[in-house]
Image (cartoon, rainbow, N blue to C red):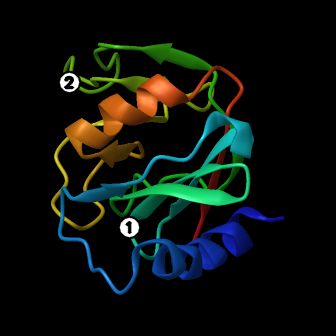
Amino acid sequence: MTASSAAALARQDMYEAFGDKELKPGQYLWRDVPASAGDERVVVSLGDQLAYLYRGETLMAVATVSSGKTGHDTPTGIFTIQDKRPMYRSKKYDNAPMPFMQRIDDYGIALHAGFNPGEPASHGCVRLPSAFAKKLYTVTAIGTPVLIGA
């Protein structure tokens, strides 16, 4: 499965899992799915500005995101979580705080808690609502797949 096809399918899975709910910036939905359902993976839809958490084939959660603004585009493709830190500060951007940082590439792109205005506004990272970022951090591991599609 490509990252873009995963992102397209995730929107339908959201409707099936949570009904006809629209999320406002900074909101998320989460439901309990047993660990026995399978391994976790994160799917990010840049077009929808949403992140989806799966456990096996079951959608567990969805959250609004703020991805990279023009000129600082969030990369698309299939990544894995390479590093996790409960608190980290950006080496590139004025020591900016990156709570619940989960780095996905060698260049500093990460999933982390941050300002979520409902549109692309970051320097390439995927900013998540704080409460969601904290919960996501507890269920992912080094090596968890992260699929980012347009």
Does residue 109 sit above or below 96 in this rendering? below
Q: Earlier in the sequence, mark 2 or mark 1?
A: 1
Is 88 positioned to the left or the right of 126 in the image? left
Does residue 65 sit above or below 132 in this rendering? below
At x 59% / y 32%, what residue is drawn?
A: 104
Snapshot quadrant of residue 97: top left
Does residue 111 sit above or below 119 in this rendering? above
Give the amino acid at mark 1: Gln
Can you give x and y, in whole percent of width and height, for residue 39 in the image?
Answer: 72, 38
Can you give x and y, in whole percent of width and height, for residue 92 in the image?
Answer: 34, 23
The residue carrying mark 2 is 96
Snapshot quadrant of residue 143: top right
Does residue 148 appear in this view? yes
At x 34% / y 14%, what residue is drawn?
A: 86
Is 8 positioned to the left or the right of 129 in the image? right
Pointers 2 and 1 in contact (CB under 8 A)? no
Can you give x and y, in whole percent of width and height, for residue 16 in the image?
Answer: 53, 80
- What quarter of the picture does the C terminus occupy? bottom right
Snapshot quadrant of residue 51: bottom left
The residue carrying mark 1 is 49
At x 45% / y 24%, what residue is drawn?
A: 138
Does residue 120 sit above or below 138 in this rendering? below
